[in-house]
Image: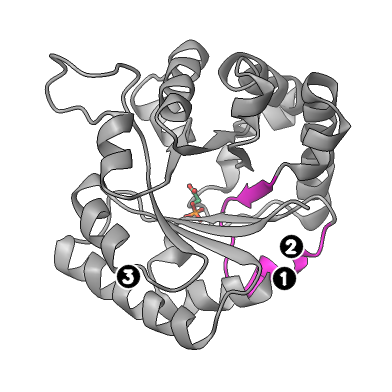
Amino acid sequence: MRKKIVAGNWKMNMNLYEGLELARGLNDHFTTNPVGDREVILCTPFIHLAMVSNLLTAPGLSAGAQNCNDHKSGAYTGEISAAMIKSTGAGNVIIGHSERRTCYGETDELLAAKTGEALRNGLRVIFCCGEVLEERQGNIHFEVVKRQLDRGLFVVSAEEFSRCIIAYEPVWAIGTGVTATPEQAQEMHCYIRRLVRDRYGNDAALDTTILYGGSCKASNAAELFANPDVDGGLIGGASLVKEEFCSIVNAL
Ligand code: PGA
């Protein structure tokens, strides 16, 4: 059975002390209110990763990074490798977030290389895909998501793919307060699951966790998560506030 997951994407927010306080608060909360068979992942800035990863003791809670480099090691000033992430104890990494694609020009090919590097180092990949507003208005959103997955993710082997989570994040919904309707989310998630089936077979399709991201918050999480193909969320802004994030996990 596929896992139900809520992942928080802190992005470039909070200094080390603020981040540790939030992580501690969440760890305490989920120690007394166990997540059960759900999973909660905190994707923190690199600076926080080792310490957050070490303090998360509640079952089902783990840490992740928001990006990694596509090379193994070497002269890449300012960059962080998948092996370095793994050595912090964090087990997850977000690859292909739309902000990386847009602000840093990350191409499908580069993302494929990053995905491979992360998987080779034993990380679980949260691979993001999603269309911009003009693409949805032009009715090419399915095509766009298919291309992103084909080129960036579906290049990995079946064994590697079993360590991947997909996050559908319509770019027009990220940080805008505009959420995809539950119907729009379900329609795309169902389509993505069909693509996984075509590429990796029926069992893989049934086992793949597909998260929704984009202005998901406590007030709309339940209706999004109620859809059969929505297995949880990738949460940006609402993951920075303890109560809000806990309510989202509760909604799952
Ligand atoms: P948001 O971000 O929840 O703030 O819209 C989601 C994301 O970018 O992962």
Would the CB of label 1 be found within 8 Å of ligand 1?
no
Proximity of marks 3 and 1: CB atoms separated by less than 8 Å:
no
Closer-to-camera residue (206/145): 206
Which label belongs to residue 34?
A: none
Which residue does the image show at 50% across and 17% down from the upper left? 112
Q: Residue at x 61, y 56 (%)?
A: 233
In magenta, the rendered stretch is 209-227
Percent x, y of residue 245: 49, 72
State which quadrant residue 145 falls in: top right
Q: Give the Cα separation between the discs numbered 2 and 1.
A: 5 Å
Residue contact at pointers 2 and 1, CB within 8 angstroms: yes
* Mark 1 Cα-neighbour bin, 10 Å: few <14, some 14–19, many ≥20: some
- Residue 239 is situated, as x and y percent measured from the top left of the image, at 44, 65
Q: Is tag 3's residue or tag 1's residue first in the polypeptide sequence? A: 3
Q: Amino acid at mark 1?
A: Ala
Q: Residue at the location (76% across, 67% down)?
A: 223
